[in-house]
Image (cartoon, rainbow, N blue to C red):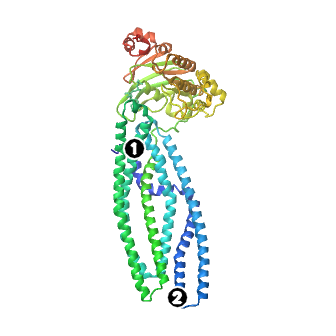
Amino acid sequence: PNRDYQLLASDDAEAQQAGKQVSASRLFGLARQEVWPLAAGSLVLLIGAAAQVYFPKLAGDLIDVAIQHEAGGSPKEARRRTSAILVQILAVLAISATADGLRSWLFQSAAERVMFRLRTRLFAALLRQEVGFYDRVRTGELTNRLSEDTRMIKTVATSSIASALRSAAICSLGLAMMFATSWLLTSLVLCAIPPLFALFWLFARISRRFVKEQLAASARATTVAEEVFSNVRTVRSFAKEGAMQASYEQAQRRTLYFGLRSAALEAVFFPVHTSLATGTMMIVLWWGARLVIDSRMSAGALSAFVVYAVYVAANFGMLMGVFSSVVQALGAGERVFQLLDRQPAQDLSSGTQRPQGSPAGGELVLRDVHFAYPSRPGAWVLRGLSLHVAPGNKVALVGPSGGGKSTIVALIERFYDPQRGSVLLDGVPLPSIDHVYLHSQVALVSQEPVLFAASIADNIAFGCPGGSASQEQIEAAARIANAHDFICSFPQGYQTLVGERGVRLSGGQKQRVAIARAIIMQPRVLLLDEATSALDAESEHMVQEALDRIAAGRTVVVIAHRLSTVQAADTVAVVEGGCIAEQGSHQQLLEAGGVYAALVRRQLLFASVSQPAP
Ligand code: ADP
């Protein structure tokens, strides 16, 4: 049931072990850069706490003045004394308000900066991970880490420290004042503290587990929801609303289960805790009353004492509350640090080389490549595959579905590294080539290109290695890609938004934007995944023309679905069972009468062209 979480957790058991031990200190270590604001915050916090603690004393003084006056003193003197106390009250109020405001600002702003840094660092750590990592982890889990866990950590790493400090300060100052007022009553109060503490420790221990489980379950529910929302058409077309509802409910039920256990725990814990605290207080008051009757204490002092005790108790409670949120944040911290620490299986920064000759020659070699997807280790997809593509040559990959054609393309893009053998560009193994350089030389246009939720211009400029392209460059690329005319037919032209909230482009239009995005990059190597039959004849022609233009003079590896593509290629490579079964020109292979000829004869390769009309 806990699969996703374990998937992440078991990813690096060692890091997880280490993570457990260090996460508390690392959690607070996050605030290290905020040491000055936090130090200043702590100082004003102490001032504010001291001011707070002074109030009960002033209250006690007032009561004593009143009582003494009642017992027969001069009204003038009593009034003078109350006025003096009022001045003190106003002064202390001003100090306490200023200190509280400053404290609040210093700690909260530090917290916001901590969260900013944590989120950006985590995002960078995630972006660094290899593609295989994303095959295994659900994106919902990751976005949850990024938003929820970081938020929880932010609060704890800074503002919770603040309130803990404040509560601790008020507790100890209050206790000191209590001792000064009556050591006897204070000793009585102190007797109640060990059982209260033990109770809290037990509560926190159990509660931590529940919270952790609940968070994991809730993340799973989010994932289900995200998946359903983004695939709403599929859900609708299969009328699977019921099944989706059920799987969401199942995930939420687990959230509910642990939520209820937390609720039950709190329902038992808090009344016991409150009764213990209130009981202690009433007994102290009872005893205090006897002390006043015996004239061993003034009524004002008793009032002050009671207020101090209430302060101390309330702040002690807050301290414990902070403790439990620290416990929650430790769970969140474990997960976040685990991701922050994860070493990607592919190091994108390892490559430094830029093969000679700018632009690169564009020679591609796959040498004895063995490859299994990390998500399915042991299931060999490529088994000793070798392929050579001379600079400027065009290779068409054909073969039965599932043979490994797309996998070859993924390896040339270095989405994955092969377990054995190597992929070389201009004689240099891909891992040794500078990451940015490699992807400025190799472009991929896939069957179903994904565009960003941005303007068409931005989507095309995305292909530019520098990141920014001029309007002229964008338009030139769009013209070559046969996209300029349809883009201009939109009222907002190149500024038209595409994606979720923008216009919906047809499959052919999307592909032409993607081709423009590749063209602007001026790659030496072009990887194409030809659309099968999703396009109507008109847009197929437009797309084909665009592809022919962009392919001119470049090394091209195309997953071919059309006879015309195969005929135009320098070489046809038949990929079957993870190997190149045959290689040669279309004509040569037909004449050879091998696998290729058989596939063509059985109409397994170019169904769209060779099938007779019904
Ligand atoms: P083709 O492009 O020739 O149809 P693919 O390269 O897509 O073949 O797939 C080859 C094999 O690899 C198939 O058995 C497929 O199930 C598997 N495969 C493809 N992509 C992945 C992936 N991301 N994770 C695990 N297995 C995959």
Q: Nearer the viewer, residue 330 or 412?
A: 330
Q: Quadrant of residue 466?
A: top right
Residue 47, position as x, y percentages in the image: 57, 70
| Residue where numbered disc 2 is placed | 70
* Along the line of sight, the residue nearer the viewer: 6 or 32: 6
Q: Quadrant of the N terminus?
A: top left
Q: Hey, what amino acid is under mark 1?
A: Ala
Q: Quadrant of ligand 1?
A: top left
Report the mark closest to the observer, 1 or 2: 2
Q: Estimate the x, y position of residue 149 in percent, counting from the top left.
A: 46, 50
> Is 65 on the left-hand or right-hand side of 378?
right
Q: Nearer the viewer, residue 33 or 261?
A: 261
Q: Which mark sits nearer the N-terminus, 1 or 2?
A: 2
- Using residue 46 as the reference point, say whether residue 601 is left or right of it: left
Element at label 2 = helix
Taking depth in this image into account, of 112 and 274 the one nearest to the observer is 274
Vertical side of 189 occupied by 494: above or below = above
Q: Amino acid at mark 2?
A: Glu
* Quadrant occupied by the C terminus: top left
Please give the label number shown on residue 18. none
Residue 221's mark?
Answer: 1
Q: CA distance from mark 1 to mark 2?
A: 68 Å
